[in-house]
Amino acid sequence: MDPEMTQKIDAILERVKDPESGLSMDRLGVVTRVRYNEGKREMYVFTELQNHLPTCNTCRGIAVAIMSSLMRNLKEEFEGEFPDITIEFV
């Protein structure tokens, strides 16, 4: 992956923040890696959400709603930054 693309990805992960803690996706470690297939113009964003869920069922429901919102924001940011590339979350 070229350095410009890496900088854009880092900027996205810094921009998208958890509304509860104010921490960026970079600091939370939700995105574990990003792979780019230049031939197919596809980007795969690997995430790890299960480790961030609380054990309390009520709290878990709230956390899932917040994470859905975060993932939506992350998807919008990636699609906005890379409009000519298909983005897929894994």
Image (cartoon, rainbow, N blue to C red):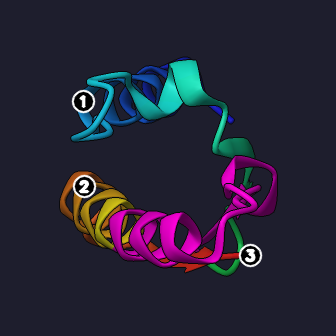
Q: Is 5 displayed left or right of 77 in the figure?
A: right
- Mark 1 to mark 2 CA distance (whole Å): 9 Å
* Residue at screen point 33% across, 27% down: 21
Relative height, residue 30 to residue 69 (above, below): above
Helix, strand or loop at disc 2?
A: helix
Residue 9 percent coordinates (x, y)? 46, 35
Q: Amino acid at mark 1?
A: Arg
For the magenta stretch, what is the residue range?
41-68
Disc 1 or disc 2, which is closer to the eye? Answer: 1
Determine which residue is flagged by label 3: 90
Q: How many marks?
A: 3
Whichever of labels 3 and 2 marks the residue nearer the N terminus, that label is 2
Badge 2 crowding class, 10 Å Cα cut-off, few under 14, some 14 to 19, many 20 or more, is some
Residue 33 percent coordinates (x, y)? 77, 43
Figure quadrant of residue 16: top left
Figure quadrant of residue 11: top left
Residue 37 visible in image: no
Whichever of labels 3 and 1 marks the residue nearer the N terminus, that label is 1
Q: Is 38 displayed left or right of 58 in the figure?
A: right
Contact between marks 1 and 2 (CB within 8 A): the answer is yes
Q: Is 18 displayed left or right of 37 in the figure?
A: left
Helix, strand or loop at disc 3?
A: loop
Residue 77 disc label: 2
Q: Amino acid at mark 2?
A: Glu
Badge 3 crowding class, 10 Å Cα cut-off, few under 14, some 14 to 19, many 20 or more, is few
Relative height, residue 5 to residue 79 (above, below): above
- Mark 3 to mark 2 CA distance (whole Å): 16 Å
Whichever of labels 1 and 2 marks the residue nearer the N terminus, that label is 1
Residue 15 disc label: 1
Contact between marks 3 and 2 (CB within 8 A): the answer is no
